[in-house]
Amino acid sequence: MITSSLVVSGAAVIAAAPALAASSTVVITEVYGGGGNSGASYTNDFIELTNLSDSPVDLSGWSIQYASAAGTSWTNKISLAGSIAPGGVYLAQGASGGANGQPMPTPDATGSVNLAAASGKVALVTSTTSLTCTTGCATAAGVVDFVGYGAANDFETSAAPGISNTTSATRKDPTKDADNNGTEFEAVNPSPKTLTTAPPPVPPLDAKIHDIQGAAHLSPLAGKLVGNVTGVVTAKSGNGFWFQDPQPDDNPATSEGVFVFTSSAPTVAVGDAVTVEGTVAEFRPGGSGGTDNLTTTELTNPKITVTGTAPVPAATIVGPGGRVPPSTVIDDDSTGDVETTGTFEPATDGLDFWESLEGMWLGIDQPEVTGPTSSFRELSVVPAGSSVRTVRGGILIQKTDSNPERVLLDDLLAPVPDAKTGDKLAGTVTGVLDYGFGNFKFLVTQTPTVVDGGVQREKTTSSNLLQVSVATFNVENLDVSDGEAKFDGLAQAVVNNLASPDILGLEEVQDNDGAVNSGTTAADLTLNTLAAAIEKAGGPKYAWRQIDPVNNAEGGEPGGNIRVAFMYRTDRPVKFVERAGGGSTTPTTIVTDKHGKPQLSSSPGRIDPANPAWAATRVPLAGEFTWLGQSLFVVVNHFSSKGGDDPLWGRTQPPVQSSAPKRHQQAESVRGFVDQILAKDLGANVVVLGDLNDFDFSETTDILVGSGKTALIDLPRTLPLPQRYSYVFEGNSQILDQMLVSKNLQPASQYDIVHMNAEFPDQISDHDPQVARVVPLPSWVR
């Protein structure tokens, strides 16, 4: 079992074919772990091997290695010696759990490996060096074959059934390996050194491509050998090709295209008419680590006959004049696994719509770009005429609309150009539809031409003499090692795009040596370098305040000690109220001055740092300022990320947002702190800002807003929908960064999300900053 497809990390798939290749030499045919236990069939655990090749295979220096169902240690092993004849059987005997069971046949190798009776993982390896993999071990270097059984967390495609003291996991057909433990093994009576009888050859089933694809997420012919499958080659990759039936059926729910996995470079050419025989398989990108991904249907172990040449079928147009995707619903009828629950409704569910086009040759007329080309060379587009657009050409995510008309152009077959939100692509862009890393991928076969949409980086206006300008800016893991260019870019943004705000709340400030895990937590060099760059760019002198976190305690890049911080101008009437006593684990509290007005016990001070809500997350920082004699409390935040949530286009529907409860707890912590201020002075001037990693319509935001007389005003919610975004993810414009103000600040405030980063491929940060120009009023003014 040797890897055959190439994958890059992050969001881009290089192969549309299985990450596993069936072994053509030695395979594991039986695994038994109940040896010697009470009621056991045999006295010892064992693993049986078979040679599928036409030549003897020397096993000298090989080993059989075992790990528990969720284990990561592979030191439990049997060293092998000797060879296996063609078609021969090799028996490796392991440990015994007692004196029960009948004696073993004479083994070919022995060892002390002790297999669990019900669940575990077994690897056949070409060396005796212990594996170091945690999951994905089936593709690890040197692994020839791999079996995960029972509740194992690693396996080939799916796990073999669980076994017992009286059953073994036995390969149904010992003459074949299709790299799917779940379908190839069954739990039956143990039979060491005795091959199970192979079933008689089954003639291939005549099928059309639409029969193979079916009107569902999984093929109705999965695991079947099919033949006389005809079509025309539309595109090819380094390990296979797509072909399509030029004579489609009348059912739009069944795709007419499919991928043929050849493992090496295919010998066919685009435009070849071919007949294919092969086994129908469902490939899940990412293997055992890609359980959130949908599968793609393909033909494996193919026999390909070129019968001539033919015109490539006309591209099926997606959008106006063709197949129009649903406009709001990704899936609304599944209850967990979309492959096994719900109904298949391509007309109304985006997930089913794109599935019905899987593998097909498609075209989109003048697609419109909704997000910048990513570092993985993916580009989000929609057909012309899509609704709920932003003012600059993006497409806005909403509570009931995740924009199923979006699709990602991918560079597997041809380069994807740099483009920004609001651009268009000229003509009809063609390609084949694939899937990987939680998204449908439109694999272009020619690089599209970009038509500039004219979107420019925004600049906000300056505050007047009565207004104090407060900004939030995620500076994306900033540290000194980022180099002069990034600091200069951020400085230009502060001076020219943000008009040098009076108070700047920063997120993702790292320590002085960044990702170097040195134990350093200080960030003075990072912040001094940014302040100096702002002055060099023609801006004012800024001072800064922050509190170093506990080393490696707040998430983010390991060693980076990410944190939030304040910067403020020293040439304007804004003053920072310095009050000693703050520390990484010391909470600031609300006390009162001699007039009964609220103030921070320490400024700057951290909010509620011992609360478990902030474990492995940036603790909020509160600062007390004055502006023309009026107090202003500012809280800068960076809540937990959405990492670990199910993807919008994943197998689980509706997607589970596993990260949300922690942000709710964090919002409750900050809301409680604000309540303490307002309890002492309902007219206090309060600004809560930062990267909240949640939407304006989220429960997180609802908690922060609160209700009644103490409710805060969420400034993004005051904007018209087309302006309500600060971040673009996979082409969806959305709010992640927010500013909330107490009620007496809102009537005199001006608010601006400065779109200068998120829509562009050349970013100095992936977030758009925001500025509010407010007038702090005396507390008696309501």
Image: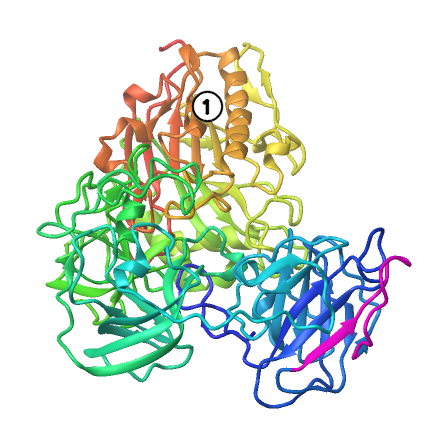
Nearest the viewer among 422 and 522 is 422
**Percent of width and height locating residue 363:** 16, 61
**Percent of width and height locating residue 779:** 42, 13
Name the quadrant of the N terminus: bottom right
Q: Quadrant of residue 306?
A: bottom left
Nearest the viewer among 274 and 497 is 274
Q: Quadrant of residue 341?
A: top left
| 585 relative position to 322: left or right | right
Callout 1 amino acid: Ile
Which contiguous range is marked in magenta?
88-108
Residue indicated by mark 1? 703
Nearest the viewer among 605 and 321 is 321
Nearest the viewer among 297 and 35 is 35
In this view, 656 is above or below 317: above
| Colour scheme of the picture | rainbow
Q: Residue furthest left?
A: 321
What secondary structure is the stretch in magenta mostly built from?
loop
**Percent of width and height locating residue 102:** 85, 63
- Taking the magenta stretch, the answer to whether it contains residue 106 is yes
- Taking the magenta stretch, the answer to whether it contains residue 409 is no
